[in-house]
Amino acid sequence: MKTNNLPIFPLGIVALPGTVQNLQIFEPRYIDMVKKCMKNNHGFVITFQKKLSDKDDYEISEQGTYVEIVDFNNLPNGLLLINVKSLNKVSIKNIVKLEDGLNIAQTHPIVDPEVDDQALLAEFPEISNILSQLIKHPRVADLPINVDFNSADSVAYHLAGLIPIPWTHKQSLLEAFDASQRFSILSKYIDEISSN
């Protein structure tokens, strides 16, 4: 993916690369966005929108995830259900709000520095072990999860998508400098969950 002006979809979730999100679309601006993306065969960017304290205002994160639509369905209630595959991290700059309220921004792919995946996976074996157990759980087994257990990023992103941590923590994992930092952060979150 090269630098592009793409639609920005601010949500209260974090789409982590490699994961699949199911989104119910009901606002006309986003229904139009989906139609245009499908017609022009390109995706859009999901970015975390954080509510500012004591205000009805939101802050849009400067990093998000480029996603592509992999499936869609019109629901009986009139909503549009889309499944999107999260492909890669992007930086978001120069956000412009169009007349219909849709945000468009300049996006640029973010490529993390390479790490020694096998050394990192060996240093934090509990992360892979927890993920391999979780994906066998009956509530998770039917989800469209495709983990590459030889990739530290794939393991970290998929585990972070499944464990109960706040969206702000998931955004921190997305914004981590590289897989090594991501594993260190994730390990701390797992320790916090285990101690509760």
Image: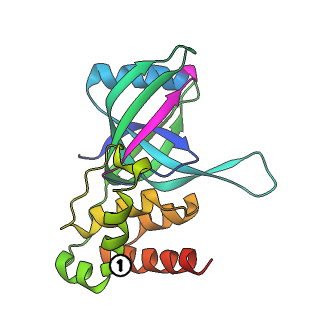
Q: Is residue 68 visible?
A: yes
195 and 90: which is toward the camera = 195
Q: Is 192 part of what is drawn in magenta?
A: no
Q: Quadrant of residue 164?
A: bottom right
* Amino acid carrying mark 1 in the image: Glu
Q: Is residue 178 visible?
A: no
- Which quarter shows the C terminus? bottom right
Under circle 1, the secondary element is helix
Q: Position of residue 134 (x, y in %)?
A: 39, 61
Indicate left or right for 40 with 60 as reference. left
Indicate the colouring scheme: rainbow
In percent of the image, x 58 and y 47: which residue is there?
12
Q: Quadrant of residue 154?
A: bottom left
Q: Which residues are magenta?
A: 18-28
Total count of labels: 1
**In this figure, which residue is indicated by the disc labeled 1?**
126
Q: Is residue 105 above or below residue 188?
A: above
In percent of the image, x 53 and y 51: which residue is there?
48
75 and 14: which is toward the camera = 75
25 and 159: which is toward the camera = 159
User: Extreme bottom residue here?
Assistant: 123
User: Extreme right residue here?
Assistant: 54
In percent of the image, x 58 and y 29: which residue is there?
101
Q: Is residue 8 above or below residue 194?
A: above
User: Extreme front residue here?
Assistant: 138
Q: Is 24 part of what is drawn in magenta?
A: yes
Q: Position of residue 58 (x, y in %)?
A: 67, 48
Other-residue count near label 1 (Cα within 10 Å), few / some / many at <14 / 14–19 / ≥20: few
In percent of the image, x 21 and y 77: which residue is there?
115
Q: Position of residue 53 (x, y in %)?
A: 76, 58
Q: Position of residue 82 (x, y in %)?
A: 41, 29
Indicate left or right for 90 with 75 as reference. left
